[in-house]
Each structure stands twice: as C-alpha cells, then as structure tokens.
Amino acid sequence: MAAPTTAAMAQNSADNMRMSADSNKRDVRILNIESAKAIADAVRTSLGPRGMDKMVSRAKTGEVIITNDGATILNKMQVQQPAAKMLVELSKSQDVVAGDGTTSVVVICGSLLKKALELLEKGIHPTVISDAFDKACQYAVKFLEEEFAVPVSVDDRESLLKAATTSLSSKVVSQYSNLLAPMAVDSLLKIADKSSGMIDLKNVKVVCRQGGTIDDSEMIEGLVLDQRASKAAGGPTRVEDAKIALIQFQISPPKTDLESNVMVNDYAAMDRILKEERNYILRIVKKIKASGCNVLLIQKSILRDAVTDLSLHYLAKAKIMVVQNIEREEIEHISKSLGCLPISHVDHMKPEKLGSAALVETASVGKGKVVKITGVANPGHTASVLLRGSNKLVLEEAERSLHDALCVIRCLMQKRALIAGGGAPEMQLSLKLSAWAKTLAGLDQWCVRAFAEALEIIPYTLAENAGLNPIQIVTELRNLHASGKKYHGINVRKNVISDMMALDVVQPLLVSTSALSLATETLTMLMKIDDIVPCR
Ligand SMILES: Nc1ncnc2c1ncn2[C@@H]1O[C@H](COP(=O)(O)OP(=O)(O)OP(=O)(O)O)[C@@H](O)[C@H]1O
Ligand SMILES: [Mg+2]
C-alpha cells in the first residue's frame, strides 16, 4: 500500500479536527438539553389540582417550605448547570409577566426540548428547528387570541372569581379557595385604576399572622398594621374618631453631628440639661397636640431614637396613641390608604395633613397583635388583607397562593380574555398546528408537527398526576377535539373528560400566551448555544 502523502495527512487531520469540533458542539447542545429537561421533570409532578406539593428544605439554615408554586420551587433549588439555570430564569420571567403558570411554562419548555432533541438526532440543523418552532408559537398565540379566547369584562365579577378559583385550586390551600378568591378579586378591584389600567400589586398589603386557620383570614376595610400600639406610660390603645398623623421626624433630644462630650460638674447644670430636654420634647408634643392629632404613626429612624421614654410619657399624657417602627417602604401605602401626608418636620404639623378614621384599635390576632384602622374618611385605592394560618408553612404558602390569584386578576385586567383550562387549549392547539403543518413544505412540516405533539404534555401530565391512564385519556381527548368539542379538558376531580367552560375551569389568556412565547424563546436560545466557556 502506498504511504499517504503529507497533503493527504494534513487533510485527514483537518477533517478529524472538524469532526471533533462538531461532535463537541453536539455534545454541549445535548448536555444542555438533558440538564434543562431534568429541571422540567422535577416540577412536572406538581402540575394541576391533583399535582403533588414539594417540601423544599435548605440545608444551611434548616429553613423548610411547602409549596406547589413552580417559580418558588425552582428559585430555592440549587442549580449549577448553566442551561438548567435558564429554566429557572424562565419560570421567574413567567412569574413577572403573568404571576401564574410558572410550572406549565417549564413543563412545556421541557417537552419542546425533548422534541427538539429528536429532531437534532434526525440531523436537522438547530437553526431550522428554532425558526420553525418560533413560527409555530406565533401561529399558536394568534389562534388562542383570535379563535379560542372568550372576551371578559372587568365588571364581570363572576368571571374574575372563576379565574381566581381555578388558580387557587391547584394550591396547597385549595380548600380555602372560596374565601381567598373573593379576597383577591375584591382587593384588585379596589386598587385598579380603571381609567389608566395601571395596577400596582404593592397597593395590596398582606399581613400574615400565625394562629387560627386560613378561614379566619379577612379583608380589612381600611388598613391593618403589623406593628402594635405602644403601651408605655399607659397610653391609649383604642381611639375613636381618630385624627392620624404619619410622621418622619424624631421626638427625642437632638444629637450633634460630631462625636462630642459635655462635662457636667454640678447638679444645677445637670438639672438645667434635663429641664432643657423636657422642654424640647414638650414643645414638640404640644405642637402635635395642637394640630388635633390623636394617633401618631412614627417612622423608624436610623439617626437617633424615634421616641424616648420621656416622649412616650408626654404623648400618653396628651392621650395620643403611638405606633412606632413604621418602615420607610410602608409610608407610601399608609399615606395612600389613610388619605394623609407624611410629615417630615414638627412645624409642618397641620390639620389638613392628617387622615381621619372612625376607629383605630389594637386587636389580638393569634399569637400577636395588630393595629386595625377602620372607617377611613378619605381612602385611596389600596386594600389590606389579614391572613391567618395555623403554622408558618401553611401561612407562607397561603400568601404565595393569594399572590398568584391576584396576578391572575391583574392579567385579566391587562388582557381582557379568558380561555378554558384543564389541557383544553393545548390539545386544541396541538390539533390546529398539526393541520397547519400539513400545508407547510420541507423540514418546517416536521418541526411544526413536533411542536404540536410537544404541547400534548399538559393534558398528559394533568392526567398522569390525577392517577389516570394518560395515553388513553389523551387519545380520547384528541378524538373529542377532532370532533369539534374544543373546550373539553380533563376533569381531574371526577377523573373524566368534561367541558371546562361549563365546569368553570378558566384561566387568563395572557398566562397561556406568555407561557408559550417564553418557553419557545428559551428553547431558541438553548438551540443556538454550541459551547460553554467557563471563566473566572
Ligand atoms: N379544576 C381543574 N381541572 C382541571 N385542570 C385544572 C383545574 N384547575 C387548574 N387546572 C389546570 O392546571 C394547570 C395549572 O396547574 P398549576 O397551577 O399547578 O401550575 P401553574 O399554574 O402552571 O404554575 P403555578 O401555579 O405553580 O405558578 C393549568 O393547565 C390548568 O388549566
Ligand atoms: Mg397555577
């Protein structure tokens, strides 16, 4: 056999290098997809009303939480692999955009990745796959918006309630959905600025108190404060016909800017200093009293003590109720809720800056106390909810679930349309996309069909989590959808297929469309990565 020439050897080694670079890129892509899929599998079992909950425990702090919320589970997970982290980010983005559907988005992305892997193995180029998936996603979103969604009016409280109840039905605290859903709807209706459509969830203040059950939770017509009233020197803890001032100045002796010492040599001088301090504080208290104020909310101070024993004593004597330690972040909410203005200097204590309320009282709630302000004369667009729960784990999950329900209503206000749940939209989309794929040419057809099949993961998982035979149920559902029953989905309570609209299982359109778009976007990004470059 003739020995290979130098040119042939060089060619050979170049080919080898290219092949190894290609296989390296393939390996990176496959590794990424596998890791991301592992994340999706981890949360898959918690999808839907019959999904399992997760107990997340943090080894370092010993902190434990029980939750069903996809974003919370993923957020607490310690994920190292960069591609897997992208799925965590995906869930976070869905949480920001829609607030609900954080499990679905990850499950859909996992399923799309699985299909993409199959296509890659057939030799289809990643760019072709991502372009086709992108087109399919746009088609799907358009279909949902134009042909599947039902418009809803913001005044239609019944429909809003249905959507909130569906969102709560898959949570740990689902048995309390008939209490939490109206709370979420009413709070949102109170804070919504109907003219501009602006909704800031910060205007809903949720105070959590351990003790009692979630059934004892209530919406307060007014304001509830986490802090308690000061009992020092026998000051009042209940005031009727209250005039409330929200102050940001301190009622304590001033401090010098520089660290300095004053030498006092005799008792007379000491008396003078004490007298001066007394007079200084008394002057402030008198000014406060003169404004007609009888309830004082005092912001926490980092410069010096906001109040001293002496000032509390004088305030108590003046029959002024004192609530200390108001956080800086709470100021805006309080001033909106009570219709008062924050006061930064005692000279600005004017009656017109005060808020009025029929009653301010300290109430015992479970283990602790809260201050309730009711009968506010000039309330702003804010809402207050007092959540109760028998233990910390339930209470925290109730708060997260209420937040999801609030987000669902916010979604409905932003995009006023509802769609059926229970896997109906995904099954309908799967059929429509498959039909559309037939009209496409070449590789696009393969890819769009794969996208359509990937969406079946939602009904499949809902059935699986409910202990049904997923293949049988999904086939049955597909047949029903093919025969025109487009709102049919999996009734996980009765383990049958029913019309989801008739069952009142509805969800905002925005939750589903954003889940589809975000999942596709993440897939596109993952497809385009062909190397991981570690750096310090
Ligand atoms: N009563 C019901 N019957 C059938 N399916 C339901 C019912 N309630 C909700 N679903 C479906 O369950 C899915 C939502 O499940 P789940 O709330 O556990 O996850 P998510 O909303 O994606 O994420 P998360 O709530 O954790 O942010 C949706 O597909 C919804 O249509
Ligand atoms: Mg949900």
Image: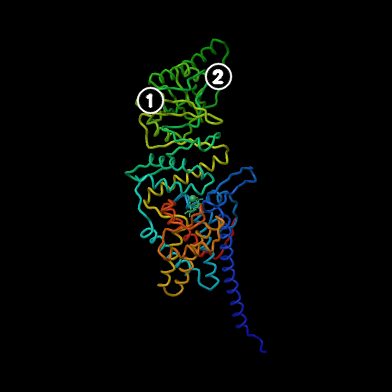
Left or right: where 257 falls relative to 289: right
Label 1 residue SS: helix
| 354 is higher (above) or lower (below) than 84 | above
In the image, 384 versus 291, the foreground residue is: 384
Q: Is residue 232 above or below residue 401?
A: above
In the rendered image, residue 238, in percent from the top left (x then y), is placed at 46, 22
Q: Residue at x 44, y 53 (%)?
A: 511
Measured along the vertical axis of the image, is residue 324 above or below residue 262? Answer: below
Mark number displayed over residue 76: none
Query: Residue placed at 56% from the left, 47% from the top?
Result: 67
In x, y percent, where is residue 505? Answer: 44, 52
Query: Colour scheme used in the picture?
Result: rainbow
Image mark count? 2
In the image, 302 versus 133, the foreground residue is 133
Q: Position of residue 312 (x, y in %)?
A: 50, 20
| Three-letter residue code for mark 1 | His
Dot in front, 1 or 2: 1
Q: Is residue 172 left or right of residue 444?
A: right
Q: Which of 481/307 is in front?
A: 481
**In the rendering, which numbered label is found on residue 348?**
1
Label 2 near label 1: C-beta < 8 Å? no
Which residue is the extreme one toward the bottom? 1
Q: Which corner quadrant of the image does residue 331 belong to?
A: top left
Q: Which residue is mark 2?
A: 262
Tell me which residue sits at (42%, 17%) in the image.
286
Which image quarter holds the C terminus? bottom right
x, y (%) of residue 439?
Answer: 40, 72
Q: Amino acid at mark 2?
A: Val
